[in-house]
Amino acid sequence: MIRNIKGTKDLLPDDTVKWRFIESKIHKILNSYGYGEIRTPIFESTDLFIRGIGNETDIVSKEMYSWLDQGEKKLTLRPELTAPVVRSYIQHNLQSLGPIAKLYYFDSLFRRERPQAGRQRQFHQYGIEALGSEFPEQDAEVIEIAYNIYNQFNIKELSVRINTIGSSSIRENYIKILKKSLSKYKSYLSPISQKRLDNNALRIFDSKNEDDKKIVEDNAPFIFDHISDEDLNHFNQLKNILDKINIPYFHDKKLVRGLDYYTRTTFEITSKNLGAQDALCGGGRYDKLVKQLGGKNTPAVGFAAGVERLLMLINDDAFDQLDNIKIYISILGEQNIPDAMKIVSDLRKNTNLNINIESNRRSLKSQMREANRQKCSYVIIIGENELQSKIVLIKNMRNGEQEKIAIKDLNTYFDKNI
Ligand code: AMP
């Protein structure tokens, strides 16, 4: 038997109902903030991710699904969506449409990570990118959106951590200090972090290696203690807005990102109900990326959030109310099938009901069992007598009551009885 690839998942009908619920709610919320959806291709030139994420990151160095196509072009299944969105923004000259482009996505992505609970190889993210504003109110809006989405799904026990890593002008000086404090521990670092210490020390912060993390945590000086006055002012304004709009947050000086194009604000939302993979959403400002990918200097801020992890936190009760009214059509007698199907066809045309018709010619008893299994609220029985008298029997599966209804009144019967 051929099975699906490790780290991927089939979404079966019970799952897709939940997915559509989540998706439609997220589309609604993001539209309400004035963001427009963008959908980019599933694969891109490998170069985009090398330039947009960086060669020395885990994603690029070991997690990408890349291949050479028949034309010897290097292609990659997208491992994230910020670089594709920025590519598209530059390519379609979206800055010409207005000073600020507010874009969002809801899509699948691919990383060859070790699968475990909350970590897949094909997974989904929704995220936003606000391109064009350098001001802290834009950062605040992005954090507010991320937070509000969880709120709207009634997710409790969230922790919002924020920090600033300052603008790029302070990096050179900070990197010198960082190198000095970490070089004493160089031999204890992983080989890749040892290399990073020489070439790009900031990237050590992105290491997932536990020993590296501990060494960094215990010994790296906080970048926050080296930011400029303007950076601090930006951060204080952001905090002020978050206070005003009642977003609870914690200033975590350890929350840094190691890529050159990240600037100032970083944030992360975690949930302690998730287990080891507790990150729901990560984001921040990336004022240098658009230029780095060949566009004009454009300040930008955004976040990316995992859909599977959100789904893990949504209580099943939230989905129960989604079941709209379901009706099972039980047909008795082979010769009555065409007329019964005509009745159902009209009912479908005139109503929004979810109607499932028996197509296996089973006994009445089996059809009732099937209706129960499918959690149908009503069964309409159509047989010889019903067709002759033009009156059908409706059985309410919730209370067992039965009622006779003229076929011509079927369209409106459920309006009153739902
Ligand atoms: P990142 O793009 O790595 O900053 O991740 C953003 C969010 O995507 C994380 O906070 C997770 O919620 C989710 N995520 C990242 N990697 C995976 C994965 N392999 N499987 C499922 N969700 C993931």
Image (cartoon, helix red, strand yellow):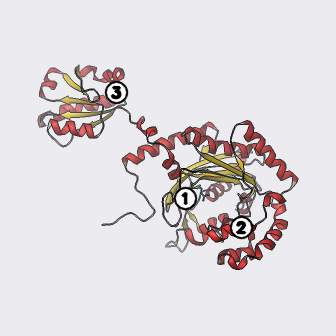
In the displayed orientation, state which residue is furthest to the bottom: 187
* Residue 203 in view here: no
Farthest-out residue, right: 229
Point out the image quarter for the N terminus. Answer: bottom left
Which residue is nearer to you in this view: 159 or 309? 159
- Amino acid type at image mark 1: Ala
For numbered disc 2, what is the local secondary structure? helix
Which residue is nearer to you in this view: 214 or 347?
A: 214
Amino acid beneath label 3:
Asn
Where is residue 275? Give x, y as percent: 53, 55
Q: Residue at x 83, y 51 (%)?
A: 232
Q: Earlier in the sequence, mark 2 or mark 1?
A: 2
Which disc number belongs to residue 216?
Answer: 2
Tell me the quadrant of the picture where the C terminus can be found.
top left
Reading the image, the residue beneath label 3 is 350
Q: Which residue is mark 1?
A: 276
Q: Assign a secondary structure to mark 1.
A: loop
Residues at marks 3 and 2, CA–CA distance in whole angstroms: 65 Å
